[in-house]
Image (tube, rainbow, N blue to C red):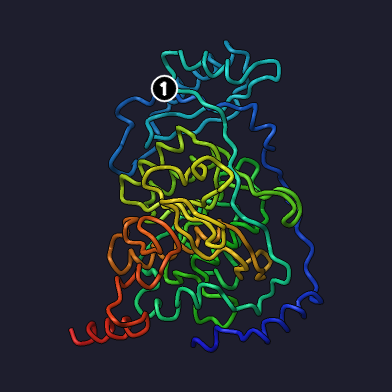
Amino acid sequence: MNAARAISGAVFAILLALCGTLPVAPARAQQAAPPSAAAEARQILVMLRLAPSHVRPNSSYGGDYGDSMSRAARRRTALRIAHREGLELVDGWPMPLVGVDCFVMRVPASMSVETVIARISKDSAVMWSQPMQVYQTQSGGMARGGDPLFAAQPAALAWRLDDLHRVATGRGVTIAIIDSKIETGHPDLAGQFVATEDFVTNGSPSSEQHGTGIAGVIAARAGNGMGIVGVAPGARLMALRACWQTGAAAAGPTLCDTLSLAKALHFAIDHKAQVINLSLSGPPDPLLARLVDIALARKTVVVAAYDPDLARGGFPALENGVIAVGDESLQSLPALVYGAPGRDIPTTQPGGKWYLVNGSSYSAAHVSGLVALLRERHRAAPPASLAASRPHGGTIDACASLLGPFDRCDCSCTIARDLGRSARR
């Protein structure tokens, strides 16, 4: 099986040269464009308090979000605030886990967003108000020469995936991928999903590259005779679209905003995801921070991409309790940041294809898959379960993470010994 997944350097070079001659299908244009970053910059979020009876801090919320009279009253309050301040009420979304109804309002170009937020926050009906932040996935785009024949996954050798899958595949673990739209019918992904939701305004019917690639790294099917194998092929996925691809092909970044991410996080928590993958980064955000804290309090593992260009790696990587992951090929990773494969990663792409991709987004996806293996094997996977080249960070040792320290024995023989003990029980 190892030989089947490994491609010699000579063969790989030949395939890489040949793939330049292969036709590539033209990128499908998005049929409904989500809001632009400039438009998002003029929007604010206004949090109106829910009545105490609607708050369920330690359980799923059963039923609708309050009776129609109370919802109508909160909407009237939102309309009153918008009218008083000269704003446009754009949207609203209940978030009982946080105890608020979240309303989106657009600030005219003639007004200061910061001044409007400060004024609205003094209203007795408002818990808080904040800007609509914009987030970006941490992908370097597709590497040239990607091809469905490239089965040489860095983790296949570095992480000994064949050996690890003898012990665990992520079975019984649900991973929420909060990202752009995933091609759930891709031949290497079909059957891996327990939920598919779209939280982006003006959602596109087309699958998108980043989310589809993240899903493949985490849980591409094993043993189907095509493509790649995910780190946790036995796990089940939630495809939660909160981000959107901009530009044709990989020409533009994949973006998300506060509200779309909050909706997806709320869904993932409420539907008991055990791992949440956030291969993105951006500014700190009070609403998203509260939702992440609720997820962590419920023993959900949150994995995020580290951005070296943002202070402390950006949000959510900077949040206490979140597993921050960067491309192990980066020149240096700070303490508390783990390194995982992030260069020349073959993975699934829209149109039933596979390409090579780069970036810390895919490093985080590797770790989300590894956490699923840990949760299957140990029933829990706190961050301390990850073994790395230094305490609390550094390049991850996947075998040691799953099996514990080796005693005069490498990964393969430790697994064989472990399986032998299990068979004798």
Residue occupying the point 54% across, 19% down? 117
Can you give x and y, in whole percent of width and height, for residue 279 in the image?
Answer: 53, 53
Residue occupying the point 46% across, 38% down? 288
Residue farthest to the top, as pictured = 84
- Residue type of the residue flagged with mark 1: Met
Residue occupying the point 40% across, 64% down? 389
**109 sits to left or right of 160:** right
**65 sits to left or right of 257:** left
Give the quarter of the figure containing the C terminus.
bottom left
Q: Does dot 1 land on a helix, a strand or a loop?
A: strand
Q: How many marks?
A: 1
Vertical placement of 266 versus 15: above or below? Answer: above
Residue farthest to the left, as pictured = 425
In the foreground, 267 or 230: 230
Vertical placement of 328 versus 137: above or below? Answer: below
Can you give x and y, in whole percent of width and height, for residue 351 in the image?
Answer: 69, 66
Q: Which residue is identified by label 1?
A: 127
**79 sits to left or right of 350:** left
Residue 162 appears in the picture as rendered: yes
Can you give x and y, in whole percent of width and height, for residue 91 in the image?
Answer: 57, 30
Residue 198 appears in the picture as rendered: no
Residues packed near mark 1 inside 10 Å, few (<14), some (14 to 19) or many (20 plus): some
In the foreground, 273 or 303: 303
**42 sits to left or right of 102:** right
In the foreground, 241 or 17: 17
Residue occupying the point 36% across, 62% down? 386
Which quadrant would residue 54 be assigned to in this image? top left
